[in-house]
């Protein structure tokens, strides 16, 4: 009998619907969360995206490459050019350039990683609720503009709020 267990040494794998793009993580993902922001909704076509952070050094594509779309001055999103699966995004700002964010549902074992908080609840769709007691955080109204502009005074505070990982 084959017993399926997830050991620490077993790489975390995932990929798109059609199988052209496959990836592997050599370290555990961290800070799993829901993002309700409008960009995630549009990028996925779903009311919410569950995603988690990973060190960029611990991530690699094992088959194919996603097409990248620069959805804002601070983020590049990757999706399969053949089937459209939304796989990952990566911040373009220097301060967060060590991270990549992976969509949990694109993992081969999405059940292994449960979201621990909600981001972007200012855009949460009224008929959609996950019915949990997880922390819920809003993004600043001009979150993207603040992070994209090195001269904005609020930038350090915003970086500190989301960047303490
Ligand atoms: Zn695909
Ligand atoms: Zn989002």
Image (spheres, rainbow, N blue to C red):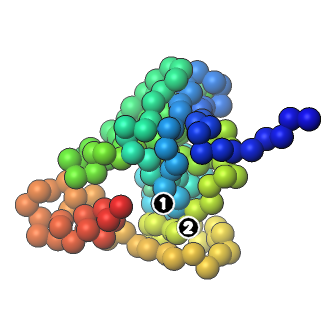
Task: Please provide percent x and percent y for residue 145.
Answer: 22, 59
Q: Circle 2 sits in a helix, a strand or a loop, which is it?
A: loop
- Quadrant of res 129: bottom right
**Residue that lies at the very extreme toward the right in this rendered image:** 1
| Farthest residue, direction bottom | 133
At a point 51% along the width and 38% down the height, the residue shown is: 25
Residue 31, label in figure:
1
Q: Residue furthest left?
A: 151
**Residue appearing at x 49%, y 44% in the figure:** 27
Left or right of residue 62, residue 68 in this image: left
Instruction: Please identify the quadrant where the N terminus is shown.
Output: top right
Task: Name which of mark 1 and mark 2 comes first in the sequence.
Answer: 1
Q: Residues within 10 Å of mark 1 (few under 14, many from 20)?
A: some
Relative side of 16 to 144, left or right: right
**Residue 151 visible in the shown view:** yes
Tell me, yes or no, whether the two marked residues, 1 and 2, touch with CB atoms within 8 Å: yes
**Quarter that holds the C terminus:** bottom left
Q: Residue at label 2?
A: 116
The dot on residue 121 is none
Q: Measured along the vertical axis of the image, is residue 137 above or below residue 79?
A: below
Ligand 1 resides in the quarter of the picture at: top right
Which residue corresponds to the image point at 56% horizontal and 27% vertical from the top-left? 22
Secondary structure found at label 1: strand
């Amino acid at each position: 009998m084959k017993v399926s267990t997830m050991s620490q040494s077993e790489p975390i794998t995932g990929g798109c619907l059609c199988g052209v793009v496959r990836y592997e993580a050599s370290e555990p993902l961290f800070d799993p969360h829901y993002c309700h922001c409008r960009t995630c909704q549009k990028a996925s076509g779903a009311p919410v995206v569950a995603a988690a952070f990973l060190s960029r050094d611990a991530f690699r594509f094992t088959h194919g490459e996603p097409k990248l779309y620069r959805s804002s001055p601070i983020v590049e999103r990757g999706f399969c050019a053949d089937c459209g699966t939304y796989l990952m995004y990566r911040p373009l700002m220097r301060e967060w350039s060590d991270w990549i964010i992976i969509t949990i549902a694109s993992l081969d074992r999405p059940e292994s990683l449960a979201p621990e908080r909600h981001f972007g609840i200012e855009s949460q769709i009224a008929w959609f609720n996950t019915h949990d007691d997880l922390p819920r955080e809003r993004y600043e109204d001009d979150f993207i503009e603040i992070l994209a502009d090195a001269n904005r005074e609020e930038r350090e505070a915003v970086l500190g709020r989301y960047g303490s990982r």
